Amino acid sequence: MRSRMVTSPVFGGDRILGAILFEGTMDREIRGVGSAEYLWSAKGVVPFLKVDKGLADEADGVQLMKAMPELDALLARAAAKGVFGTKMRSVIQMANASGIGAVVAQQFEVGRQILAAGLVPIIEPEVDIHSPEKGAAEVLKASLLAQLAEQPEGRPVMLKLTIPEVDDFSLELVEHPSVLRVVALSGGYSRDDANAKLARNHGMIASFSRALTEGLSAQQSDSDFNATLD
């Protein structure tokens, strides 16, 4: 299915900046070429790799990332395959300052390890869209700004954030000199809802997986599949 999406004539660098691969997808080929190499050489799409190993149990209203003892080896392999950057996800359920601080500290600690390996990290502290405490986004923004203030010059990161409830709430992050891009996750919103919310937040761009693949199925003819993806 991933090969079908990537090889579709409507999927290309004129509309898509980057694509995030699972490790298994990175290790496979598309039309006889390594997946990351195919994305860039055939489609002009920048390849990223999901590097986290899933979420730890909830504590202090958040879920940190599980330990990644093999990360350095994975990063070296990714760089050799032509991968540009990485993505790693934590989840925030409640506006707990201690928990959110731990999430952001862990994300930036690992992010700096990724930068040292020559790759660009997408830092993703997702605020659950069903959280009863949407104020978590405010605590998160303050914590992100504090870490960005410590970011070495010339070593920018990317941020992947839940679309905020308050329009342009993330604009300060979008304009920060240590941030390459702020991308928005659809987070379970329908495509229509995610698009409408994103359109009201200037400078954020879509990083949608669930919303992008909505309506696609393996049973569709190529013409129907491509028309839906289009």
Image (spheres, rainbow, N blue to C red):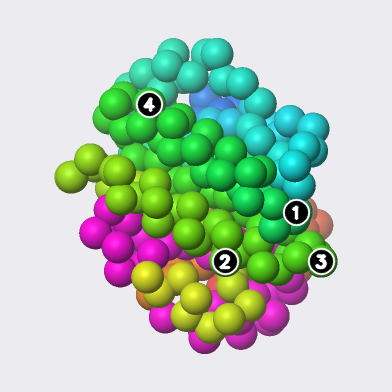
Camera-near label (4 vs 1) is: 1
Residue at horizontal 71 percent and vertical 34 percent from the top: 55
In this image, 205 relative to 175: left or right?
right
Residue 200 is covered by the magenta coloring = yes
User: Where is mark 4, residue-wise?
Assistant: 113
CA separation in Å, label 2 and label 3 = 14 Å
Report the front residue among 198 and 125.
125
CA separation in Å, label 4 and label 1 = 26 Å
Neighbor class of circle 3 (other Cα within 10 Å; few <14, some 14-19, many 20+) is few
User: Where is mark 1, residue-wise?
Assistant: 93
Residue type at numbered disc 3: Pro
Residue 161 drawn at (x, y percent): 55, 60
Vertical relation: 204 (above or below) 222: below
CA separation in Å, label 4 and label 3 = 33 Å
User: Where is mark 3, residue-wise?
Assistant: 132
Numbered tag placed on residue 138 in the rendering: 2
Which badge, 1 or 2, comes first in the chain's sequence?
Answer: 1
Vertical relation: 70 (above or below) 123: above
Neighbor class of circle 2 (other Cα within 10 Å; few <14, some 14-19, many 20+) is some
Camera-near label (1 vs 2) is: 2
Vertical relation: 42 (above or below) 29: below
Residue at horizontal 58 percent and vertical 81 percent from the top: 166
Q: Secondary structure at mark 3?
A: loop
Q: Which residues are magenta?
A: 173-202
In this image, 21 relative to 12: left or right?
right
